[in-house]
Image (spheres, rainbow, N blue to C red):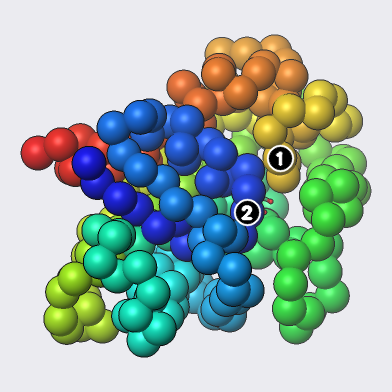
Amino acid sequence: MQRLLIATHNRHKIEEIRSILGPGILVVGANSLGIALEPEETGATFAENARIKALAWRRWLVESSSQTQSLDAVLADDSGLEVDALEGAPGVFSARFAAAPGHRGNSADAENNAKLLRLMADIPDGRRTARFRCVLSLLPVQIAGIESGLGQVFEGSCEGRIAREPVGDGGFGYDPLFIPEGFERSLATLGQEVKNRLSHRAMALRRLRQFLNQ
Ligand code: ITT
């Protein structure tokens, strides 16, 4: 069985990853290691930020010799929402969209959603297209030279549009505002099972699972 450390403090991501990967892969949430490692996400792309997080957690694992024997790889997820009418914003700033510039740390989901709705108040229905994107960075624990580019990247996206008001309390983040293509209701109303079939994270994780099963 593969054993992965999930390099995130976002408990929703951990739950979704565990559920989508299923029983054949052991998912260990970074929150269970009891340290608050929060590498600064300075990358310009999801891929860069995913790698920053994977590298930071892997370095910590190796330096602290913590569980390096019992884990095969570190998996980081960087993800976010790209709105066409906002030229791809909030993008890599999705988690801290409503925060003041330069502020470290995430803003509350409700504040991010309120800012998005404010910026899109005048955007007509036909121009409210958007997508969620997820980039996963997988770094094996037991190899040398990890800083020099080894590792794997898996991507997924989910097309949809932005609603006029938040609806539903499932999922997290922008789910109450995001209506996936082919649906009339927000992702937050469709239930976790549906989300875990069609989400950006599900697509990226299917690719990861295929790779692990090769
Ligand atoms: P880590 O960096 O610790 O993984 P985070 O929540 O800060 O946790 P990101 O930097 O990748 O993660 O930011 C992702 C943000 O994008 C997240 O906070 C949401 O606002 C949004 N997002 C990502 N996936 C989402 C999803 O499935 N549903 C709704 N919003 C999502």
- Which residue carries the number 2 mark? 10
Are the residues flagged by discs 1 and 2 in contact, CB closer than 8 Å? yes
Q: Position of residue 62 (x, y in %)?
A: 32, 80
How far apart, in angstroms, are the residues tagged by discs 1 and 2?
10 Å
On the question of residue 162 being in view, the answer is: no
Question: Between residues 68 and 41, which one lies in front from this camera angle?
Answer: 68
Q: Which residue is mark 1?
A: 172
Secondary structure beneath dot 2 equals loop
Q: Residue at x 29, y 70 (%)?
A: 68
Queried on whether the Cβ of the residue with tag 1 lies below 8 angstroms from ligand 1, the answer reads yes
Residue found 35% across the figure and 68% down from its top = 67
Please state the horizontal and vertical placement of residue 50, each as a whole percent of the image: 44, 64
Residue 174 in view of the camera: yes
The amino acid sitting under disc 1 is: Phe
Identify the residue at image location x=46%, y=40%.
17
Left or right of residue 51, residue 145 in this image: left
Left or right relative to 7: residue 111: right
Image quadrant holding the N terminus, namely top left
Q: Nearer the viewer, residue 109 or 214?
A: 214
